[in-house]
Amino acid sequence: MFDLIKAPELPPQLKWKYANEPELLMWTIRARNYNTFVANCMFAFMQLVITGGAFIIFSNHSSSDSFTVRFLIALGFHIFLSLTILSMTHQRMNFAYRITQSGVEYCEWKDFPKWALKTIKWTAGITAVILIFMATIDPSFLLGALIGPGGMGLTYLAMANSKSYQAMHTEYHHHFLHWSELTKLIIATNRVMAEVRYSVPKVGSPYMTTGSLYVFFKRQEKDQVVTTLKKHLLPSTPSVTGKVDVLN
């Protein structure tokens, strides 16, 4: 779970197509490749709902239970649901960029989140120990230990052993764009990134395929990345600064 702060390494499934060409710039990063404003609003709204639910559980639990017992149950409910929602609204994709004289080569991939399995396993184990301890005070907690940690244990087994589920959460993509195929550079003001629009020939068709390449980088790398892109774009390619809406 803690490897989220480390720069990702290019997986063996992906190889640089122009590896023999000297790189002008190369970096890797994990980034949220979607509309983060909407995702943050969703998470904030769900926090209100979860907090309300935790308060109801705290207030409506048996009055014979101590304050500590009611607080721990409500806190466990809040933490578990918050982590679940966070894993959905704040997912990150791995990116690797390599700039050469020929163009911009980039890879994007999403590995199966093994940290999620570890989180579920440890949460289930710790919760089970707490509830079993509480059962020495009130035997009704044994039912909670069976339903809560037991359900998380079954979820862990299903995720760990389902190849189709793991494949659904794993992606590998490799792309390359020549400088002549880049049509516009937009340096984002609302996020630490840039959008590069492109137009490439459509295979077997006289028409062109247009789209956007989202270039993510760390804040301290912004000047170096933007300068390198501007330097190698065609003189006729416009470069502007403005808001970028990630449409993935």
Image (cartoon, grey):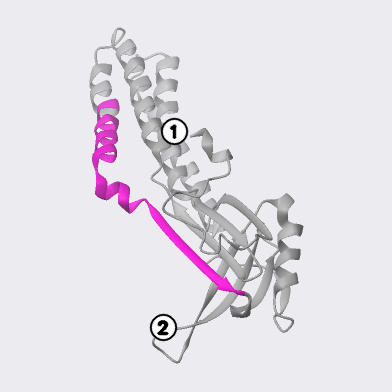
For residue 192, above or below residue 51: below
In x, y percent, where is residue 41? 53, 53
Residue in view at x 67 percent, y 73 percent: 185
**Magenta segment range?**
149-178
The residue positioned 45% from the left and 38% from the top of the image is 82
| Structural crowding at the residue carrying mark 1, measured as other residues with C-alpha within 10 Å and reported as few (<14), some (14–19) or many (≥20) | many
In front: 131, or 160?
160
Kindly identify the residue that appears in the image at 58 percent across and 39 percent down. Answer: 5
Give left or right: position of 112 versus 35: left
Mark 2 / mark 1, whichever is N-terminal: 1
Residue 227 point in image, percent of width and height: 76, 64
User: Mark 2, mark 1: which one is toward the viewer?
Assistant: 2
- Name the mark on residue 232: none
Specify the farthest residue to the top.
136
Reply yes or no: does residue 155 show up in magenta: yes
Residue visible at 54% across and 45% down in the picture: 8
Q: Which residue is mark 2?
A: 203
Q: Is residue 69 left or right of residue 29?
A: left
Choose top left, top right, bottom left or bottom right for residue 230: bottom right
**In terms of depth relative to the viewer, which is nearer, 61 or 172?**
172
| Farthest-out residue, front | 20
Q: Is residue 199 above or below residue 216?
A: below
217 in relation to 144, above or below: below
Main secondary-structure element of the magenta-colored stretch: helix
> Which residue is more in the foreground, 62 or 230?
230
Q: Is residue 15 magenta?
A: no
Residue 147 makes an appearance in the image: yes
Q: Which mark is residue 78?
A: 1
Q: Disc 2 residue type?
A: Val
